[in-house]
Amino acid sequence: MKAALQAIAEEPRIAVYLADVEGYTRQEIADIMGTPIGTVATHLHRGRGQLRVLLQDYARGRGSVPPRVPPVSSNQTDPPRPRGLLPGRAPARPR
């Protein structure tokens, strides 16, 4: 955990540490860091996202998380729909 936290950029790392380890509110973190609260929210979002990826990779390497499976696109599983028809509607009559 410590190595993963050290791997993210400084400002997101500080924000994540103050929020998730020390328990400060976003407003308190904004006051400590001297930045607007919206910037703190951005740092928390980015820092937590980076931390999540790093920790998932670590857990995957230890066999704690199953390997990634690529998502199946919807066009591979849905049958093709006739062009120009909407569900529940009759085709338009020629004029």
Image (cartoon, rainbow, N blue to C red):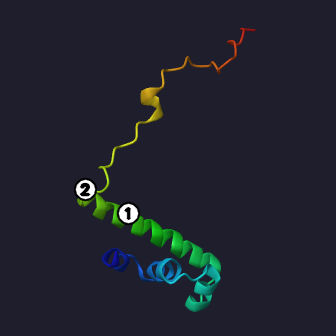
On screen, residue 81 above or below 75: above
Q: 55 or 13: nearer the eye?
A: 55
> Between marks 2 and 1, how big is the CA–CA gap?
15 Å
Q: Quadrant of residue 57?
A: bottom left
Residue 31 x, y percent position in the rendering = 62, 89
Precedes in sequence: disc 2 or disc 1 = 1
| Number of numbered discs overlaid on the protein picture | 2
Residue placed under numbered mark 1 in the picture: 53
Amino acid at pointer 1? Val
On screen, residue 56 above or below 21: above
Q: Which mark is residue 72?
A: none
Task: Name the residue located 35 percent from the left edge and 43 percent from the top edge.
Answer: 70
Q: Secondary structure at mark 2?
A: loop
Amino acid at pointer 2? Gly
Q: Quadrant of residue 6?
A: bottom left
Residue 40 x, y percent position in the rendering = 57, 78
On screen, residue 84 above or below 33: above
Q: Quadrant of the N terminus?
A: bottom left
Residue placed under numbered mark 2 in the picture: 63
Q: Secondary structure at mark 1?
A: helix
Residue 47 x, y percent position in the rendering = 46, 72
Task: Name the residue located 35 percent from the left edge and 66 percent from the top edge.
Answer: 55
